[in-house]
Amino acid sequence: MDVFKSFRSPSGGETRVLDDIDLDIRRGEFFSLLGPSGCGKTTLLRILAGFEQPDAGQVIIGGQDMTGVPPHLRNVNTVFQSYALFPHLSVQDNVAFGLKMKGVPAAQARTRVMQALERVRIADFASRRPDQLSGGQRQRVALARAIVNEPQVLLLDEPLSALDLKLRKELQVELANLQESLGMTFVFVTHDQEEALVMSDRIAVMNRGRVEQLGRAEELYERPRTAFVANFLGSSNLIEGTVLSVDGKGATVQTVHGPLRTTHGEGLRPGQNVTLSVRPEKLRMERDDETEGNEIRATVDDIVYTGAENQYLLRAGGQQLVVFQLNADIGADEDFDYEEQVALYLPPDNLVVLEEA
Amino acid sequence: MIRRTHPALSVWAWLVYAFLYLPIIVLVVFSFNDSRFGATWAGFTTKWYGVLFARADVREALTNTLTVAVVSTLISTVLGTLVGLGLWRYTLRFRTALTGLLVLPIVIPDVVMGVSLLMFYAFVRSGLERLGWTFDNGFWTVLLAHVTFQISYVALTVRSRLAGYGPELEEAARDLGATGLRSFTHVVLPLALPGVLAGALLAFTLSLDDFVVTYFTSGSGFSTLPVLIYTNVKRGVTPDINALSALLVLVTVVAIVAANALLRPRRQP
């Protein structure tokens, strides 16, 4: 897949909604498109479904060029954000709709419908109407209605966003299991980074119509390439600086906090301006005064208790840094106080060098 | 919690309803009055209904009324449904204005509608005469006049029936392999159908008992029941006209009740 898409803005000018998207989604993988609202992820999904056409580029599904092919001729099904169940049809007629349109014999269709309903554990409600179901149940019906057609690709447009948190977490696990047992390619659109991390084999993080970074959850989290990815997936401390020296084991970067070592020196040259990113939970606060390497002095500004962890807001070198410390009562130092002076250790391996935006 | 109403409020409500319905009740009662002349009760009879249907002018007006009502309802239902679907489906630039323009024929005084149509027909006629054609006011002018105000009612009932259903239902149908036509026949039409039927029934009753617009556009020699009633009443109220009016009321009430049943609020999806 390799597409461009522009929309005309109301003022008459053109806005690029999708710009140079080049994605290769693998057969049988759980692939997520993650990004804030307006980043183009839903438009991309609609291009895959055939509801929108790209202005340039190609959509290839299962080796076949599907560019310009209308939705009803694509072997692709969608689970809509609003479920879009047909209100005048019973649950089983909803699920049977796709098979009926394809002319599958009634008896065979009935078996497949029941199998699909059992698969998503909603078979008891087969003869109900959609308006007699709860949100979670409707979600399951929408899922059954799509998978019963055995599509090459299943598209899911924020299908869990209308559900409450607990149900959403349950369905995340179920959905991931379902995908695994079906072996079907899932393309999942979400703005919820946690959802994407939990469920996906691979994630494409999108921003302003572009793919910022593509990779496995762990890669994206541990090695964000841009400031956007670093902040959209979890939170990050960003520190700007200039490369002092590069050697075989990494690089030294001059920052407002003094020189900092990073083990990620590939492709850097001295004198270059860079941004370093470090996750709040990777930082270590200490009380002793000796400064070893990669330590900076900081003052506790604010403390937020969130249950599982304490979040410290620190002041250092005119910058605010965030540190998460697990509330484990073991290993780590005891709690710190407001306005306390601390030494903050930044592990060189966790200082990631971002690409200049 | 059930609140008891103040007794005075009940009395007031009964008065309001009496004010609304007493004239109609009197009309219906006197259609069974065994007296040639109006206001005194002289026993029960159904003979006026017989007398009524024996009159050739009544039978002709009845045929005219039903023909106009049925044909105009068919035309306006098709056109009005298309308008309603269009307003639902497309994000049109002037959607609010277009919807407003649909309401206009409903709120505009009938007299104005009647006069404007009369003038319009005269205008068209003078244009056609230059080409050597002409037509008289009669069945066709009345038919078209009725269609003009019926379309609005149908379009608005269809539109409001579909309000709350998003365009993603059509997309879902397409996504599941339905062609454009089949997504219309299998999804959109079944959803709109109660609105279409209710709109048709409304349109039918409106045509059935329209007097003003018909009076202006019918010309001489073509008469519907309401117009016939009016011309007869000018010579004094007779029991057979009471009977005729009672029948019109009956048909209208049945149609309206049916339309309301179709538009019963559905449970939210």
Image: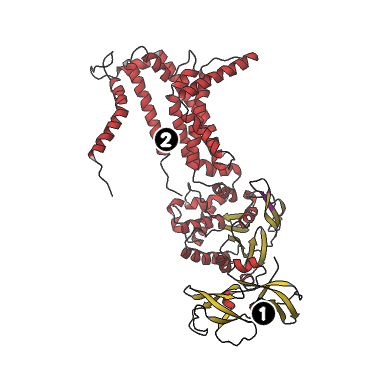
Q: Is residue A7 magenta?
A: yes
Task: State if disc 2 and disc 1 touch (CB < 8 Å).
Answer: no
Coordinates of residue B98 in the picture (x, y in percent) = 55, 36
**A40 is higher (above) or lower (below) than A289:** above
Q: Is residue A60 magenta?
A: no
Q: Secondary structure at mark 2?
A: helix
Instruction: Please report the bounds of the magenta region as a residue range.
Output: A5-13
In the depicted view, which residue is nearer to us: B130 or B65? Answer: B130
Coordinates of residue A284 in the picture (x, y in percent) = 57, 81
Residue receiving disc 2? B259
In the depicted view, which residue is nearer to us: B164 or A64? Answer: B164
Residue that appears at 45% across and 35% down: B198
The kind of residue tagged 1 is Gly
The kind of residue tagged 2 is Ala
Quadrant of the rendered image containing residue A246: bottom right
Residue B51 showing in the rendered view: yes
In the depicted view, which residue is nearer to us: B167 or B63? Answer: B167
Residue receiving disc 1? A258
State how far apart marks 1 and 2 are (Cα). Answer: 80 Å
